[in-house]
Image (tube, coloured by chain):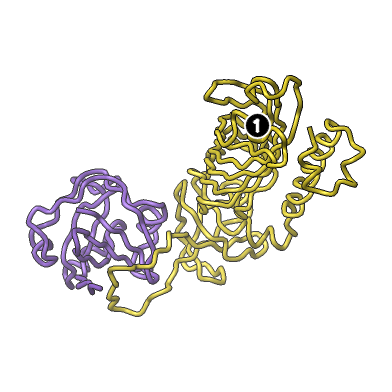
Amino acid sequence: MSILHIIPILLTLGSQPNCDGFGMCILERESETTLTECMKYENCIQAEMDFVEKELVLIVSQSKIKDKAFIKYFTKENFELDKDYTLPSEIARELNCAENTTIPKGKYPINEENGKIVVRFKI
Amino acid sequence: MAKSWCDLRSKNICKNLPNGRFLHILIIFLLLISNSTYSQNTSPTPDQTSRILYKKYEFILECPMYRCDVEGNKLDPERLTAQIGSKFLLIEVKKDTCIIRFLINSKKAKKKRLDFSDDDIEYYKYFRITKAQLDYKAIPSNTQKLAFTLGSVITPLKLRFSPFDFSKDFTIGSTFGVKYTKSDFAPVSFSGLLGIGVSSITLDSFSTAGKTKSKQETLAFTPSLGFMLEFGNAQIGVFTGIDMLSSTNPLFDHYIYKNKPWISLGFGYSIFTGNGGKR
């Protein structure tokens, strides 16, 4: 059994470049500065992420996610990605995955594991 | 000919019955037995209905709602809009207000253990909608895709091979199996079924390789296997099975389709489906 090493992230949901629609728009490491900025936007969520066995795992707490973002992105069966999303180099390095790791567009099942919302992206 | 069946059972029952009449009585008896058995399971009590059938719902229209706590106290005056297709649990109904929480597929991690850093496990968001919106904009949702199914099937026409023949040797009996429903919205499902039944078999010169000149009817025990497509309560399916004559039948060894499978189209009507949450 492998234990995941999760990093805290801030994820602005929606498609690039305007962060509308469905998908991932901006992914950054959580810090005091980035958190303050993120909290200004309805579609920015506090989450956690890890990469293990060719799967990128997005973990979201219902307590931390804003109501509008929760309803729009996490109340259906699948998390939708309208466009491919390439991980930023800094995040990819922290997660120990390859540079330019890309999550293909598509639908990914949303599950609840131990009370948290979990989406697993196969890379 | 009902002689073989009479040999297996009490001769006192059969001895005074003409062959065809015995067959008819047996078929009517089978129908009555199966119908009465199923009907015992079709009428849940009102209490069972509210607990089992109407716990999970799905929005079919956009629905305005407000964030609340588990008791229904409004936490935020901002109006939110539920997405079409999102599923939820009805937590409580208080007069005209319904407290709900969204349903996310529950999955136990087998290989990868999530090492949570905080203690907010089991935290949920609750929302309130009106009872009128629940009635108009949501439907009971069946998230169970596989279900046990029970029913009866009549196969009125059989295709036999080696040599090819088709006959009206119909089979009537009960079937059971697993039913798969792809979508909660579409009334289409697919079933894999096992069946047991009784067949009426025509024994004549052709089917006994000339061992008998007269045409006679007899009964056979018929296990079968089938696949069925269901539209609402109407069903159509393809079945295959073997008609097994009684070994006491004098023509048992001469029946040319002995241990040879037949193929048939089946038509039926589902009386009871045991999936509990079906709309």
Q: Quadrant of the N terminus of chain B?
A: top right
- Chain A drawn colour: purple
The one nearer the camera, B4 or A44, is B4
Q: Is residue B94 above or below residue B277?
A: below
| Residue B267 drawn at (x, y percent) | 64, 31
> Is B80 displayed left or right of A99 in the figure?
right
Residue B222 lies, in percent from the top left, at: 64, 40
The answer to whether any part of residue B23 appears in the image is yes
Indicate the chain on which mark 1 is placed. Answer: B
Amino acid at circle 1: Thr
Using the image as rendered, state which of residue B13 and residue B253 is in the foreground. B253
- Residue B122 percent location from the top left of the image: 43, 73
Callout 1 crowding tier (Cα within 10 Å): few <14, some 14–19, many ≥20 = many
**B176 vs B20: above or below:** below
- Answer with the quarter of the image where residue B124 lies: bottom left
Q: Is residue B73 above or below residue B193?
A: below
The residue at which mark 1 appears reads as: B155
Which of the 4 image quarters holds residue B218? top right
Chain identifier matching the yellow colour in the rendered picture = B
Q: Residue lying farthest right?
A: B16
